Image (cartoon, coloured by chain):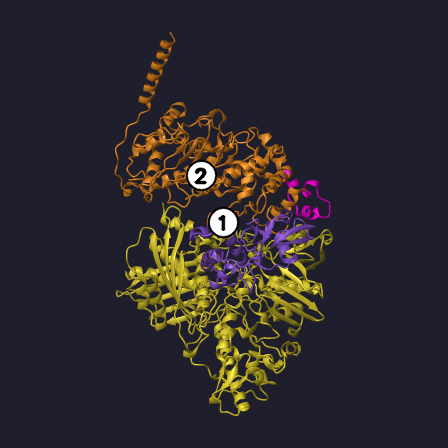
Chain colours: A orange, B yellow, C purple
Amino acid sequence: MLRRILLGLAIMLAVAFGAFYAWQWRGELPPASTSAHAFDPGIVAKGAQLAAIGECGVCHTRAGGRPYAGGFPVQTPFGVVYGTNITPDRETGIGAWSEEAFRRAMREGVARDGTHLYPAFPYDHFTRLTDGDISALYAFLMTREPAAQANRQPQLDFPLNFRIFAAGWQLLFLSKGPYRNDPAQSAAWNRGAYLVEGVGHCGGCHTPRNAFGAERKHEAYGGGASEGWSAPALNASSPAPVPWTVDQLTAYLKAGFADQHGFAAGPMQPVVANLGKAADADVRAIATYVASFIGPRNAADRQRQTDAALAFAKQRAVNVGDLARTTTGVATADDRSAGGVLFAGACASCHRSGGGLPASRPIALALSTPVNASDPDNLLRIVADGIHPPAGERGPIMPGFSGALTDPQIVALADYVRAHYSRGQAWPNIAAALADIRRNPTPAMEAP
Amino acid sequence: MNAPLTSPSRRMFLATGGAVVVTFALRPLSSLAQGTPQAQPKLPGSLDKAPYLDAWIGIGGDGAVTVFAGKAELGQGIKTALIQCAAEELDIDPKAITIVTADTERTANEGYTAGSHSMQDSGTAVLHAAAQVRGILIGLAATRLNLPPDQLQAKTGAVVANDGRSVVYKDLVTGEALHQIATAQSPLKNVKSFKIIGTPMHRVDIPGKVTGAPMYVQDMRPEGMLHARVVRPPNYGAELVAVDIAAVEKLPGVIKIVRDGSFLAVAAQGEFQAIEAMNVLASVAQWRKIAALPEQSTIHQFLGRLPSQDEVIANKGAPSLQGAHLLRATYTRPYLSHGSIGPSCALALWKGDKLTVWTHSQGVYPLRNTLANMLHLKPEQVHCIHTEGSGCYGHNAADDAAADAALIARAVPGRPIRVQWMREQEHGWEPFGPAMASNVSGAIDDQGRIVAWTYDVWSNTHSTRPGGPAGNLLAAQYLAQPFQPPPPSEIPMPEGGGDRNAIPIYTIPNERVVDHFIPQMPLRVSALRALGAYLNVFAIESFMDELAAAAKIDPVEFRLKHLDDPRARDVVTKAAQEFGWTKGKRPRGEGHGFAFARYKNLAAYCAVAVEASVERESGAVRLGRVVAAVDSGQAVNPDGIRNQIEGAIVQSASWTLYEEVTFDRSEITSLDWSRYPIMRFPQVPESVAVHVIDRPGEKFLGTGEAGQGPTAAAIANAIADATGARLRDLPLSTQRIKQAIGV
Amino acid sequence: MTVLNVNGKQHEVDADPRTPLLYVLRNDLALNAAKFGCGLGQCGACTVLVDHNPVFSCVTPIAALEGRYIRTVEDLGTIDKPGPIQRAFIEEQAAQCGYCIPGMMMRAQALLEKNAAPSDAQIREAMAPNLCRCGTQMRILRAVQRAAKLMTVELNEPREMKG
């Protein structure tokens, strides 16, 4: 009896697998020949804009490598997937891909030769693009400098190194098709939604993922991770002390700085560098969309929270008068703590307010998201590694303090900063978080 | 100018046994004439300003030889080069020579160490003075040994006779043996016999600098010294309305708070205490802001609309631009910062009725007069001693730091006061290199020859150096009784200011060059290395390439077609040869660029060839090989020349690709390296090779500023070659290049 | 009172524990090499070694440094007996104004302790935090290469017994 049941099950599984296999199988599309001159410059320009918003170059360029030639390691919970060569090189890039092949990859996650692509390539977002925009991106990529660089195979834990699992993932989690306008919302909101949900793929970092590595749709923008950094929640749980407004978001995304939130750091640096090249209207549209769900929903709550945050920041501003009074015994106990003394000597020369020397103009620490986040990861990475602008560009220079400060000192400093500049609870185990960061140092990220 | 010294202090410094240097030594020739002035022949170099030989060379009773020079060591290696000149002509080991520079009580007044004049003025003077001293020594030995001079020669610190007898220098020099007025002719050695001049002798100052010796004014720690900091206004012209100093006086270590009108400073025991006190003082100071600045993005149009004093500086033929290929172009540069790595610093001590100032100012004598003017003193009461700072590259905040220190020292007599400027203060308050614009037009005939040329350049003054009136010192402008800056003036040709190198060196039958001097200065400006030559050579050499392209002639060939000076041709040919200049096709995105200029059309010749590649996606420039050739006349220290040109190339590459001062409608905003980025190691060229063409026997030609202009144009020409995009507005930033390339 | 180990010697320093190391080195200990360039950790003129790491002494308070090993240029050699890095900089004449050079040498020392034969690209990357305004970078790169060779020679030479 048991044998019959098992045999029946085996047959069902075989049939199911067969059906699945048939469903997922994709044929190879024939190689195409295109000439860079075949593309309308206006369409190429539109593609450039979309590529900027989509940050294609960030994952498809390795540190020190040729633009779009691939090799960048995308860290996933399952191993490393390397960005591929998407230059028009025929042998190692996508030079032989027709527009149809390109569209299939963007909408369905299938390469020209029929292989299923791992969702480290966020086609679950790119599928939201219109055909016209996919054509424009194709035109853009086909007119880049070809670079011969062979793709590196992914290094995934067994058995995920078999592509059939990518197909399975698509079956479960990929809902294909372009974005559909919400008629109840404004044109700008819809444009922003189209860009964010589509080419911008913000949820790729800012939405938590399930055990299969797929975004949890019901927790959209509830926070995630990228390259070892925390990607803060962009929904009602946003940790920013001052609720983000359209203006602040626009400023931050366009120029990497918002005066009530601070500078872009970590993986956001190349993002804002790219968005700096995008059309102002598009960046504002993105800001409009995100502003519609980030932070408190109620206008009165937003005002209350803004006022409270600014008042707290003012009260806790590193007033130079306070610093000087530390030695005359008027300061608070925590100013004289190990962390407080370190702060005064290592941080205050830039991170003070008042005083006649507007140095790098970092904002009040009490307004900073990393200081107010639920985990210390981003603050620790910033303190350990610093912030560095791209070569020759204007941008904040913050030295990294690894080496200058011991890890226990960095922990004490982070503890002090949290206590002094945040109304949130103390972080429970900063030392463990720092040890984790030491095990996973920040890789170099370059934006072409 | 020079004032006769009455203080005996110098005599006391130098009186050692036989050699006595008299205070008269520093008097200029003209003040020595008795009765009716006689016509005097012009003496070589700065000997003309300080004609007594012992103003330049001293030989002590212990045999020690001292060279006195009015020029200062700025890191350009002048101390070493002058020692080489003296050692050669005096025939002694350079290690036996000590050099004293730029001290208002010990050295000649050679004005400013600027304009690449040091070798021309001071080098020439030291060379000739040493030769004449050698002649005197031989003469003295002839008397002593009872031999004719032709049987004697100077050799390693002694005069040696053919018969083997010898007398060391110190035994020859007694009384005022060297206190003689120089003659116009000198018994200079034959250049072929040079053993020290022309060799890459190691710099005398480097060993101390790499082993932590106290080499800089920043390293001085005299007994009783106090650390001071100045609180500067929030922007130009702001007035200090109120400041509650009571809170600050109680801070640990604070000794004195100085307020004079809107000048506000604090002196404290410890350095960190001074910084903390400065911060607190700044937080309690209340200012009334007055000034408004123009819009940065349209600054050239703004400057162009200001009243200007126009002067035609070249007018040849009739540049009618008809019937020929005609091109026009406009070139611009932004305000640029000196960006000295070490912010300015000075020490001052007020004792009795005498003020002593240790400063890295480029002109200790002019500074002395200016400080005296500010403090209502007689110049003799002020003693300025040049002490090295970090590289200044022109008129930075050095003199202002000296003024600050002097004001505070006056308020705390008897204590040496050390003022250290902060990074933000140096970036925000130093006088910048002015923004400039120029219009060029040129016509070429069918043979590819330039037949007509017009050039118009607009610029503020390139010098607001303190030269007497105190109004050029920053602090003096903010005192309760403020000094007004004197009206600026253009530096006259042939040197020029904004019009430096505005006249092309090329042979052009019809040309007209006009200098539009703009007196009104919305931002504080003064001399930055090369002055107007940076923009003018950038413009001319970029335009030469544009003309060459229109004529379909290779850019190097095109230049040679219009260059008659054989030394200029040699430099161009040498650079092209060493670079491997070819007309071949290059890999995509890679370009070669060439440029040439003779600094001021009368100093060193310099040609630069650059290989650059441009990344199409970003517009980023990567500099590959850079090859330069330079002719500085007689090369005293070829490695010193190479060092200067290498440095000029890297510095100019940074200016050209990255730099511009930024400002909003109220104040300067590029206040530190994060907002005024300069080139870092990963971006410096792959290699820089400098070839020195030595011209033994020729005059020394100023070299320190010769590389700035050609480098800028060579880079622009390389970018044009690589991308087809011609950029004319400095800096040639990544964004501008990307915009020009397109998607 | 803070006890600092500088160049192998213990010093008792009576300065506010918040004081950045740079001011203590220069003013309390009269060590001239490390320089004030910006006080903001942007230029590297103040670079010294702490536990073999290159740090900006202008933003490192002495409170962080008790019990740690601080090294400055003065420990690399003297004017009469310059160490390999100093010799390399002298031989290459790698200085114009020289103000940035001590910071350069300490950062180079840190690099060469970790990587005895760095490539040109690795040197450029390692030295990037330090600014030179005179444009001496080409010579500095050559000096670091030369120092690497000199240090290897020194390691391989038979050592004399130190009395």
Q: CA distance from mark 2 to mark 1?
A: 49 Å
Q: Position of residue A279 (x, y in %)?
A: 43, 41
Majority secondary structure of magenta residues: helix
Closer-to-camera residue (A446/B653): A446
Residue C123 visible in the displayed image: yes
The picture quadrant where one finds residue B411 is bottom right
Residue A81 position within the rendered picture, expressed as x and y whole percent measured from the top left = 40, 34
Mark 2 near mark 1, Cβ–Cβ under 8 Å?
no
Does residue B291 show up?
A: no
Point out residue B716 in the picture as x, y percentages from the top left corner: 38, 57
Which residue is tagged 2?
A281
Tell me, yes or no, whether the highlighted magenta stretch contains residue A322. Answer: yes
* Residue type marked 2: Ala
Q: Are marks 2 and 1 on the same chain?
A: no
Residue A242's place in the image compared with B427, above or below, is: above
Chain letter of the residue carrying label 1: C
Left or right: where B559 falls relative to A198: left
Q: Secondary structure at mark 2?
A: helix
> What is the span of residues highlighted in magenta in the rendered image?
A312-336
Residue B144: x %, y % from top left: 55, 90
Q: Is residue B465 magenta?
A: no
Residue at 48% over, 83% down: B186
Q: Name the foreground residue: B554 vs A63.
A: A63
**Amino acid of disc 1:** Lys
For residue B252, side relative to residue B590 (left or right): right
Question: Mark 1 = which residue?
Answer: C114
